[in-house]
Image (cartoon, rainbow, N blue to C red):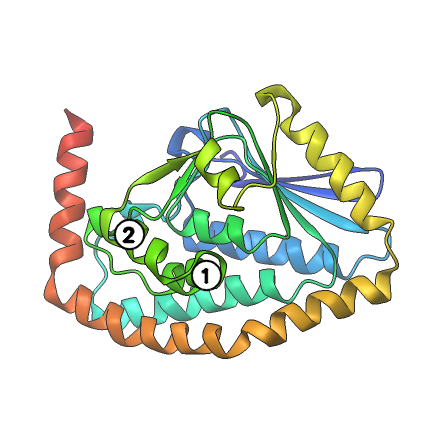
Amino acid sequence: MTEDILVSRHERVAIITLNRPEKLNAWTTPMRNAIIDALERFDADDNVTAIIMTGAGNRAFSAGQDLSEAHDFDGERAVAWVKEWQRYYAALRGLKKPLVMALNGTAAGSAFQVALLGDIRVGHPGVRMGQPEINAGIASTTGPWIMNSMLGMSRTIELTLTGRLMDADECKQIGLIHHIVAEEKVLEKALEIATDLGNKPPVAMRLDKQRFREMTEPGFQDCIEAGARIQREAYDSGEPARMMEEFFRKRAK
């Protein structure tokens, strides 16, 4: 079986590649756990000064949650699921080293959120980003928290309730993508940025990132608590399962 993630090095930059291109690099719980393990390992490695995350293929950075895994959740399993996301997001937020997101394609749903938890984002003109969970009957809690801190309430409400995906130009205009380059140059540009960040004074880098985490920690804890409460109600209602079944039927056609 193909590994769900691939890890490599370019000099002192570690690269984590999401490796389910046939599933648009959508993640499952075991895949997220593998990503967490890689992040923690590289963060503790003195020979690594920066980390890049990217996706395999040219269609998606990641489509977010693999719906086939979440389809059969009940309220109790949904609460445990939220705690799994807390561990994933805490690992990203807790990195001492810079994290650059090399967006090779669409970043949707939880992958949009993960991309925003990186420090610098590089994309190409074909990249799309957004929060389409509502279309699958999944309520959003962490997404609005992240978007509100970056975009404000008005844009957060619009993106959450419509579920639309933004194109690369819009993402650049509102500050979500920092650099747009040709598709074949995305990883090259990300390596350039990661190398530069990795050469910064490491104590100052660690303390700056620590302070960003401290500034946003109350909101993070609040959204996790709300997520457990809201996802229990959502999944006990049966609506996510019904909407996912409809999605699967449309995809099969």
The image shows residue 156 at horizontal and vertical percentages of 35, 57
Sort mark 1 into few (<14), some (14-19) or many (20+) by Cα contacts within 10 Å. Answer: many
Residue occupying the point 44% across, 26% down: 59
Q: Is residue 190 above or below residue 219?
A: above
Q: Is residue 31 above or below residue 231?
A: above
What amino acid is labelled 2 in the image? Glu
CB under 8 Å between discs 1 and 2: no
Residue at the spot of label 1: 146
The image shows residue 26 at horizontal and vertical percentages of 41, 42
What amino acid is labelled 1 in the image? Ile
Quick check: 36 left or right of 45? left
Residue occupying the point 43% across, 55% down: 29
Quarter of the image for the C terminus: give it.
Answer: top left
> Which comes before the other along the chain, label 1 or label 2?
1
Residue 216: quadrant of the picture: bottom right
Residue at the spot of label 2: 158
Q: Secondary structure at mark 1?
A: helix
Quick check: 118 left or right of 154? right
Q: Which mark is residue 206?
A: none
The image shows residue 63 at horizontal and vertical percentages of 39, 40
Most foreground residue, 206 or 233: 206
Residue occupying the point 83% across, 65% down: 204
Most foreground residue, 14 or 154: 154
Q: Is residue 187 above or below residue 203?
A: above
- Observer able to see residue 210: yes
Quick check: 51 left or right of 238? right
